[in-house]
Amino acid sequence: MIRLENVSKVYATSTRPALDDVTMDVERGEFVFLIGPSGSGKSTLLRLLLREDVPSRGTVWVANWNVGRLARRRVPRLRQRMGCVFQDFRLLPNKTVAENVAFALEVIGKPRHTIRTVVPEVLDMVDLGGKADRMPSELSGGEAQRVAIARAFVNRPLVLLADEPTGNLDPETATGIMTLLERINRTGTTVLMATHDRQIVDSARRRVVELSSGRLARDDHRGVYGVAR
Amino acid sequence: MLFVWREALVGLRRNLTMTLAMVITTAISLGLLGAGLLAVRTIDRTEDLYYSLIAVQVALDEPTSAEDPDCSSPVCRDLRAELEADPLVASVEYESREAAFTRFQRIYAGQSILQLVRPQSLPATLRVTMDDPLRGTEIVDRFTGRPGVRNVVDQRSTVADLFSFLGSVRNATFGLAIVQALAAVLLISNTIQLSAFTRRTEVGIMRLVGATRWYTQVPFLIEAVVTGVVGAVLATAGLVAGKVFFLDNLLSGRLLANTIPPIGMTDVLGYVGPVLVVVGAVIATATGYVTLRLYVRS
Ligand SMILES: Nc1ncnc2c1ncn2[C@@H]1O[C@H](COP(=O)(O)OP(=O)(O)OP(=O)(O)O)[C@@H](O)[C@H]1O
Ligand SMILES: [Mg+2]
């Protein structure tokens, strides 16, 4: 589903590569944690998958797209098949919860009656059925993140990318988010989650890929966050 | 599609002052353009009116004027025959001194100038209607100084002043319209850039969710088009008001009655209005499109 072949990324403003010759493979339906210290290149890797940036060297594949060489006008198609969740939620501030979720369907041109039935279903799935008409500013962090996850998932994406989705949340709420992501993963969606959350990684016992200064340092099938330091 | 309209309205409301400035500038520029178009219409019509009336007047000298009520004298007959044979000439009519005096009395009925004019001061004339009114000077050149001819006057030269006045009104309005249009274009472009800048985070999120560039930019285009169309409607309303409260009085007043044909409501609503709406929409769309292409990256 995701394949990186000798991918390097050097930002124009720095000499040290943010990603350095990374090769990895993620199968369809896998759940993968991406860990590593701050600045190790986790966000950069996700940005390359979303085509927010292009690799300096190497090839990035998502499904059958050669993401780095995708024509600009095809990028929306790629993103419509991927979901993404961020530490800062990135909800549209002047749309309600339901409108935010509906937006992901509107951009792919889903008819209105479909949107009207699908949005409440997904909001129920993330336990926000009663808050469809709230504005994002009226939500707690955990709720906002669940809206973001609902929006990312409502299209049934091939891949869900999450960049520190629990970074701003207390441990209990974080566990709730994690449960949600695992549920989504069980529907067959490939999940790639960058995180610093030791507790979550350790209790999930999933595949763990560790980056260190842009290099692939570790790839464990049923990993833990790391030896206590 | 509903979404983009909603976005556009939000955008227009968010920046109400700028929106108003845009609409007003656009309206003024389109109003001036409309005034220019109306001037052109009026000039064309005035010209039609006059060209059907005006003629080259070959005034005959005193002996012929005094003695020939029906162009039967050899001098008059020869002149008339030669004029009628000329390919430039459509028709020739003889007006005797008595007929001229009767017409004069009719035109200036009740005015003091009537007391000053005796029949003796009016010549008999051959009124020559031209096939092409613009070539009257050729007749003037050919017949001036001929025996029996007092003088030859091309009436067109007497209305030339009126046309040149109307022409400069038209040019001035068009000139102002262009300057105003430039201001409107810059203002629209600037507003779109500002609008896009205030919404860059939002647009960034939309793009991440998979919205196309087109999808995120159409609201800005709609903002521009709405501005153009609203401006055009206001401009048309302004022209209607100008017609009803100002021009109608002016053109039917003593000075200009029967000199310049009045401007009809159909000219404003049926011709200029639609033209302004189309021009406004096209200019605004083009401005919006170019602005988004050149200045708004996403
Ligand atoms: N837009 C950018 N321009 C220049 N350098 C960048 C840019 N984004 C990231 N970097 C650099 O690339 C390196 C990797 O950054 P990245 O954001 O991928 O790290 P990360 O693993 O996500 O860190 P964190 O855990 O703090 O989020 C860092 O050294 C960072 O300074
Ligand atoms: Mg990061």
Image (cartoon, coloured by chain):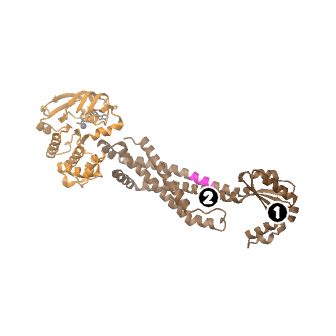
Chain colours: A orange, B brown
Q: Residue at x 48, y 59 (%)?
A: B234
Residue B28 spot, x, y in % from top left: 52, 56
B170 in magenta: yes
**Furthest residue toward bottom:** B110
* Subunit bearing disc 1: B
Q: Secondary structure at mark 1?
A: loop
Point out the quarter of the image occupied by ligand 2: top left
Kind of residue at disc 1? Ala
Rendered position, A182 above or below B237: above
Residue A119 spot, x, y in % from top left: 23, 50
Query: Mark 1: few, some, or many residues within 10 Å (few <14, many ≥20)?
Result: many
- Distance (Cα) linking label 2 and label 1: 34 Å
Q: Nearer the viewer, residue A33 or B7?
A: B7
Query: Mark 2: few, some, or many residues within 10 Å (few <14, many ≥20)?
Result: some
Mark with earlier residue (2, 1)? 2
Q: Secondary structure at mark 2?
A: helix
Residue designated by label 1: B124
Residue B44 visible in rendering: yes
A187 in magenta: no
Kind of residue at disc 2? Thr
* Subunit bearing disc 2: B
Residue A189 spot, x, y in % from top left: 19, 39
Residue B93 falls left or right of residue B182: right
* Magenta stretch secondary structure, dominant: helix
Numbered mark located on residue B42 in the image: 2
Residue A221 spot, x, y in % from top left: 14, 30
Number of marks in the rendered image: 2
Residues in magenta? B168-176
Q: Nearer the viewer, residue A220 or B230?
A: B230
